[in-house]
Image: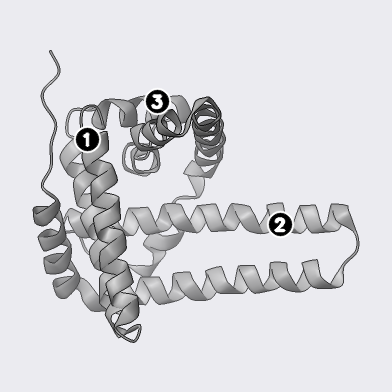
Amino acid sequence: MEPKRSFSSVDALKFGLDRTTKNFGQIWLVLVVYFVVFVGINLLTAFINGRSQNFLLILSVNLATFIPALWLSLGIIKVFLKVVDNQPVTLPDLFSQTDKIFNYILANIAYFLVVVFGFILLFIPGLILSYKYILFPYFIVDRGMGPLEALKASGKATSGVKLKLFGFTILIGLVAMAGMLALLVGLVFATPVCAIAFTYVYRTLSADAA
């Protein structure tokens, strides 16, 4: 019999707040670089899309910029995993996941197809499947898993807690929204708090999910 999995949303947010307070400078150094690079990629894409009539060029540019965006998202996951594990964060961590990008692309394709199929059947199955496999990027970064292995591990980790995960994502969404309403100043704090809290939930649920 599999162990019963659970987590505390309150504990996760408290943990996120504590780690953000203790690592604020390190975290935001990485996040600023991430946002600058990410915005630069999007501006380049928009510039070429707006000036070119060549469909193949536009498609190629969008694909070429999509891959670095995925690569950076893996780096962000690595950064927050290190924060949760109480390890020092450095800027190179953001660019450290090159070897996992291919598996991440394949896993994203598989995730997209599975979730879309669920939504075609009905809204609820699609929502359930989206939360069943929501943790797959963390397994790829944290344990170096392949696409199917990561999806399977996520399915195991989220067993019995998908509804609670749904509620938790709404909660951290409200926290982020409150940060935006506070003249965006609160968002500077809310962004890492929410990201660390979600990573903490991954750590809690994934202990024996491999």
Classify the position of the N terminus by image quarter. Answer: top left
Of the numbered discs in the image, which one, if any, rests on residue 149? 3
Mark-to-mark CA distance, 1 and 2 = 34 Å
The percent position of residue 121, horizontal first and vertical second, equals 52, 25
39 relative to 55 in the view: left or right: left
Question: Which residue does the image show at 25% across and 43% down from the upper left?
Answer: 165
Residue that mark 1 sits on: 206
Q: Amino acid at mark 2?
A: Asn
The percent position of residue 172, horizontal first and vertical second, equals 26, 59
* Residue situated in front as seen by the camera: 129 or 108: 129
The percent position of residue 71, horizontal first and vertical second, equals 51, 53
| Disc with the residue nearer the chain's start (1 vs 2) | 2
Of the numbered discs in the image, which one, if any, rests on residue 62? 2
Disc 1 element:
loop
Mark-to-mark CA distance, 3 and 1 = 13 Å
Q: Nearer the viewer, mark 3 or mark 2?
A: 2
Disc 3 element:
helix
Mark-to-mark CA distance, 3 and 2 = 28 Å
* Residue situated in front as seen by the camera: 24 or 125: 125
Question: Which residue does the image show at 40% across and 36% down from the upper left?
Answer: 127
Marks 3 and 1 in Cβ contact (< 8 Å): no
The quadrant in which residue 20 appears is: bottom left
18 relative to 62 in the view: left or right: left
Q: Amino acid at mark 3?
A: Glu
Classify the position of the C terminus by image quarter. Answer: top left
| Disc with the residue nearer the chain's start (3 vs 1) | 3
The quadrant in which residue 22 appears is: bottom left
* Residue situated in front as seen by the camera: 135 or 67: 135
Q: Is residue 27 visible?
A: no
